[in-house]
């Protein structure tokens, strides 16, 4: 794998100070990534919708310092110092230092906030780490001016991946593939790429209502979950199946076969959770209300001949997916029948989005 392309080769023209602000989105996988090897190499390829409204906004202020052996940074979340997030960010900087040697030259102050409610159970690592990666690439571009837009996005995704695998899919949009796959041109285990084929109009502006079924801290983190795929009895078949599913998904997205889309997306969500149920130690992230919501969606779909479906992340919340032309009817259904299964009746209306934006 060609990681050498991400090393900084030319001389850098350091500036005394710089500041960049990026808004980067969350994403929801349609074919799931679950299982990895070092360093953050996925066991199978995955594809996700980039979201529009769920995002992180991060500013990094860089002040030139004497070069030192240590990476120095301050971290603020929603205006307050956030020391408990520091070890994860410090580990991220350690993993990327080879590719971003300039981080030793600056004192960094990171200010971050999310558009979604704090501890909503929505994973913020994808948007959070992709935002930091994108700010670093703005600095790299400033001190090493001849980088192409294409390279900047590729390296931002590459860096984000080293922080959190799914973060590699949070730079571009509306559909991103991460993981080497024979049917997806340009795909790589090292970074996410925009789905390279023309997508059928039915999947344009696809809607995602995120039902906040459980806002608590997950009992099992995704890094522990990924590790439980090592020696998992069904792992090898799962990785094969996921790659096959990505091939099928590629055709579905191009042809606009929404019935097959529904079947594949729901099967992927339940298979992800089946892997958790059959890990050892086993664990369950769904809550009773997750199942209530799923059953209500199935009933509504049958009774209304609707194209609504669901997917799940590594948690209890449910992503309700539906085409734009059902927005009004499905929103009414969610309000009337599904909101009651959410904590404080809360859900977030989102849709597919176009990726990172500089502010
Ligand atoms: O990026 P991580 O390590 O938090 O893993 C995310 C895994 C899932 O969200 C469950 C699936 C996916 O592909 O996003």
Image (tube, helix red, strand yellow):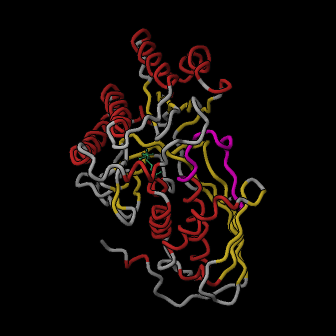
- Horizontal relation, residue 133 to residue 257: left or right: right
- Horizontal relation, residue 334 to residue 292: left or right: right
Looking at the rendered image, the quarter that the N terminus falls into is bottom left
- Horizontal relation, residue 42 to residue 329: left or right: left
Q: Residue furthest right?
A: 79
- Residue 106 location, x and y as percent? 67, 81
Question: For this rendering, which residue is in front, 302 or 117?
Answer: 117
- Residue 205 location, x and y as percent? 50, 36
- Residue 321 location, x and y as percent? 47, 30
Does the segment drawn in magenta span residue 199? no
Identify the residue at image location x=57%, y=62%: 88
Q: Is residue 325 above or below residue 228?
A: above
Q: Is residue 93 above or below residue 45?
A: below
Would you say the magenta stretch is mainly helix, strand or loop?
loop
Quarter location, residue 249: top left
Does the segment drawn in magenta span residue 123? yes
Question: For this rendering, which residue is in front, 320 or 215?
Answer: 215
Identify the residue at image location x=57%, y=53%: 127
Q: Residue furthest front?
A: 281
Question: Which residues fall within the magenta stretch?
Answer: 111-126
Question: For this rendering, which residue is in front, 9 or 251?
Answer: 9
Identify the residue at image location x=60%, y=25%: 342
Q: Is residue 358 above or below residue 295?
A: below
**Badge count:** 0
Q: Is residue 118 above or below residue 260?
A: below
- Horizontal relation, residue 238 to residue 177: left or right: left
Looking at the rendered image, the quarter that the C terminus falls into is bottom right
């Amino acid at each position: 794998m060609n990681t050498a392309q991400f090393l900084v080769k030319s001389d850098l023209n350091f500036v005394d100070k710089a500041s960049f602000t990026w808004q980067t989105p969350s994403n929801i996988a349609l074919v799931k990534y679950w299982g990895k090897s070092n360093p953050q190499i996925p066991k199978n390829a995955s594809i996700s919708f980039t979201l529009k409204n769920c995002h992180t906004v991060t500013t990094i202020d860089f002040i030139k310092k004497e070069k030192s052996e240590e990476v120095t940074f301050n971290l603020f979340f929603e205006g307050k110092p956030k020391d408990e997030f520091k070890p994860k960010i410090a580990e991220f900087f350690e993993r990327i230092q080879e590719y971003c040697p300039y981080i030793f030259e600056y004192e960094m102050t990171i200010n971050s906030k999310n558009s979604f409610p704090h501890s909503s159970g929505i994973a913020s690592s994808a948007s959070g780490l992709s935002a930091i990666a994108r700010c670093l690439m703005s600095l790299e571009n400033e001190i090493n001016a001849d980088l192409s837009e294409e390279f900047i996005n590729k390296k931002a995704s590459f860096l984000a991946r080293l922080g959190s695998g799914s973060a590699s899919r949070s730079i571009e949009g509306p559909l991103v593939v991460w993981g080497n796959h024979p049917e997806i041109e340009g795909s790589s285990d090292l970074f996410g790429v925009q789905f390279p084929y023309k997508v059928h109009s039915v999947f344009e502006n696809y809607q995602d209502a995120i039902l906040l079924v459980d806002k608590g801290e997950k009992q099992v983190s995704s890094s522990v979950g990924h590790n439980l795929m090592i020696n998992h009895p069904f792992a090898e078949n799962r990785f094969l199946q996921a790659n096959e599913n990505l091939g099928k998904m590629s055709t579905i997205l191009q042809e606009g076969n929404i019935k097959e889309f529904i079947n594949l997306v729901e099967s992927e969500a339940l298979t992800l959770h089946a892997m958790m149920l059959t890990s050892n130690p086993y664990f369950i992230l769904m809550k009773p209300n997750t199942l209530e919501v799923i059953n209500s969606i199935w009933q509504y779909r049958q009774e209304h001949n609707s194209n609504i479906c669901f997917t799940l992340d590594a948690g209890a919340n449910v992503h309700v997916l539906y085409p734009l032309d059902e927005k009004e009817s499905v929103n009414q259904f969610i309000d009337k029948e599904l909101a009651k299964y959410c904590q404080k009746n809360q859900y977030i209306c989102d849709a597919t989005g176009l990726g990172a934006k500089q502010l």
